[in-house]
Image (spheres, rainbow, N blue to C red):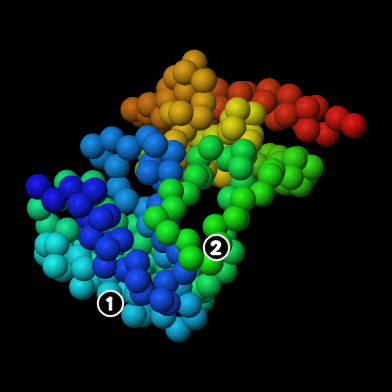
Amino acid sequence: MITREYILSRIEEGLKDTKQINAIWLEGSDGTNSMDQYSDIDIVFDVEDGFGNEIFSLLENILTDIGRIDLSYEEPRNNPNSRYKVYHLQDTPDSLFLDITVQISSEHKFITENDSEIPYIIFDKKGVVQYESLDADELNLRLINRLYHLENMMNQKARAKKYVKRNKFLEAMGYYHKFVVTPLIELLRIKYKPINHDYYIVSISKHLPPDVLGKLEELFKIGSVDDLEMKIEQSQLWFSELLKELREELEKP
């Protein structure tokens, strides 16, 4: 079996002397030291301008030498200075995806207080990886702004309710998640893990207290339109209580 350690060692050995590569680091579970048998590999390459295509060619040569590539997909991005591609090698665990981000030469700043985003540096020739402290005032203003938008998302819960009344389960479920559950999740994150308020369900089992997580999980257990009607009301009540509490906390002088 091809291991993640072997893949990483081959990538480092094959690319460390390439002068157009400024830095390589790992993110995700490697940075937070939370790997298990299902972990993928999140790799970031910082490269010189004009080297974007070549880095992927070099990387694919290394991967092909390890095994057959059975997935190679580039996700469209609006940022011309950042590209993202996913690979998978045959004869590796199904979950062992290689999530490759290539960015054009620039500083990458990590917030020291954010224990969910920690780089594991393979090499950094030009000091690309930087650290800075959390700007608590800026975060507070951002969260206050989010409260406004989340409240107005929840104010559209009737989009889900109307499909409950029409007995249209799929439409009701879709709008329930969009206009009810999603703003509730972010509000919970603002309360319990504000620095990661925009993570949606990523690492949510680690970021919420067990009792809160259990209560939230119940809102996902939907078996019928009647369940949806009840859980929309439960979610809205919980949301309203949290919103009042957070407004008082965040907006106090």
Q: Residue at x 25, y 39 (%)?
A: 38
Q: Crowdedness of circle 2 by 10 Å Cα count: few (<14), some, many (20+)?
A: some
Q: Sequence order check: which comes first, mark 1 or mark 2?
A: 1
Residue occupied by mark 1 = 57
Q: Hey, what amino acid is under mark 2?
A: Val
Q: Position of residue 170 (x, y in %)?
A: 37, 43
In this view of the protein, which residue sits in the foreground, 166 or 186? Answer: 186
x then y, percent, for residue 204 = 47, 33
Name the spot of residue 206 as percent of width and height, x first.
Answer: 46, 28
**Residue at image point 47% right, 49% down:** 119
Q: Nearer the viewer, mark 1 or mark 2?
A: 2
Numbered disc 1: secondary structure: helix
Which residue ends up furthest to the right in the rendered image? 253
Q: Which residue is at the far top?
A: 211
- Badge count: 2
> Would residue 148 be seen by someone viewing this image from the given angle?
no
Q: Which disc is residue 27 wearing?
A: none
Q: In x, y percent, where is residue 51?
A: 41, 80
Q: Answer whether residue 58 is visible to the viewer in this image.
A: yes
Q: Quadrant of residue 107?
A: bottom right
Task: Mark 1: give few (<14), some (14-19) or many (20+) Cα within 10 Å.
Answer: few
Determine the residue positioned at 53% across, 67% down.
126
Pick the residue in front: 180 or 247: 247
Q: Which mark is residue 128?
A: 2
Distance Cα–Cα, label 1 vs label 2: 23 Å
> SS of the residue at dot 2?
loop
Q: Is residue 203 above or below residue 40?
A: above
- Up-down: is 148 above or below 47? above
For badge 1, the amino acid type reads Ser
Image quadrant where residue 54 sits: bottom left
Residue shown at the point (38%, 28%) measured from the top left: 222
